[in-house]
Amino acid sequence: MRIISARKIRDTVSDLCLEANLFLRKDVLTALRVAYSKERNKRAQEILQAIIKNALIAKREKLAICQDTGLPCVFVEIGENVQISGGLKRAINQGVELGYEKGSFRDSIIKDPLSRGNPGYQPAIIHIDIVKGNKIKLTVLPRGFGCENKAQLRMFKPTASITQVKEFIVQAVRDAGPDACPPYVVGVGIGGTADYACFLAKKALLHGTRYSAHRTKLERDLLREINQLNIGPMGLGGETTALAVNIETQPTHIAGLPVCVNISCHALRSASEII
């Protein structure tokens, strides 16, 4: 049994909060550059160039990629042969608070969703999974709510066709329009229960913007249809409405077909480390 201290988890989460908010993921930056090279709409090209420049300045100057540093979501994969010396959730929340203080990131989290008000700290949304081994993998995904607000869930009848599912996913992006700062990465969760489909859609954003050869046919078809919407970078038209569509699936009940769409803006930020 390997022992990992809560302090180590706290410090790792703190570092990941900084990394995620300051340094755009390499795969996203690459996808933006590829989109720029292929985009034929001049105004869309200029916007993509500005987005890329913003990411490079953020990295050089160690400034937040986006002013909305979001609600931190932390994905934790704990090896079954790991023992944590201290409280896991407390360590994660301390790490988030420390990282956001170090980065001077905006405190956007309110204590009560109905009465509102600001608690003065950054509680994280924590997802925990038990896996084989004696290590812990931590991933921080800050979620700005310009895009989180555009999430959609539909509980289809089990008789629904793939065409109907595709239409729902494309319509969710059409509904988002320019509001969530395209070009998007579109996460899709299919199966499980209603809540789990939503979890899968968010987890799908961690996949990376893979090349088309590594995508499923459904992902390729959806990406093509979404890019025909002409929403374009920042909603001003063009061929690049989305950089990628990532799908996660899970077995579900015979009587249902949950489908969730979770959209990320062009500043898809996440960072991971294995302890």
Image (cartoon, rainbow, N blue to C red):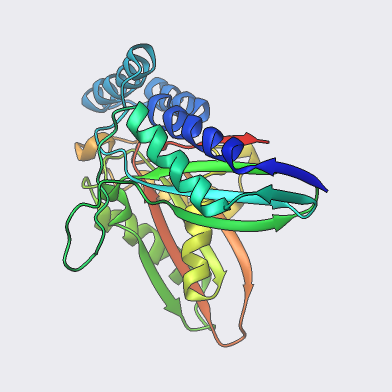
Q: Residue at x 41, y 60 (%)?
A: 261
Give residue 74's position: percent from left, percent from top: 50, 48
Q: Residue at x 41, y 33 (%)?
A: 99
Looking at the image, which is closer to me, 18 or 203? Answer: 18
Q: Residue at x 34, y 38 (%)?
A: 183
Quarter of the image for the C terminus: give it.
top right
Quarter of the image holding residue 113? bottom left
Give residue 30's position: percent from left, percent from top: 49, 24
Q: Is residue 217 above or below residue 265?
A: below
Give residue 2's position: percent from left, percent from top: 79, 44
Farthest residue in the top direction?
A: 60
Q: Residue at x 37, y 58 (%)?
A: 170
Residue 162 visible in the current orientation: yes
Farthest residue in the bottom direction?
A: 255
Farthest residue in the front direction?
A: 86
Q: Is residue 236 above or below residue 162?
A: above
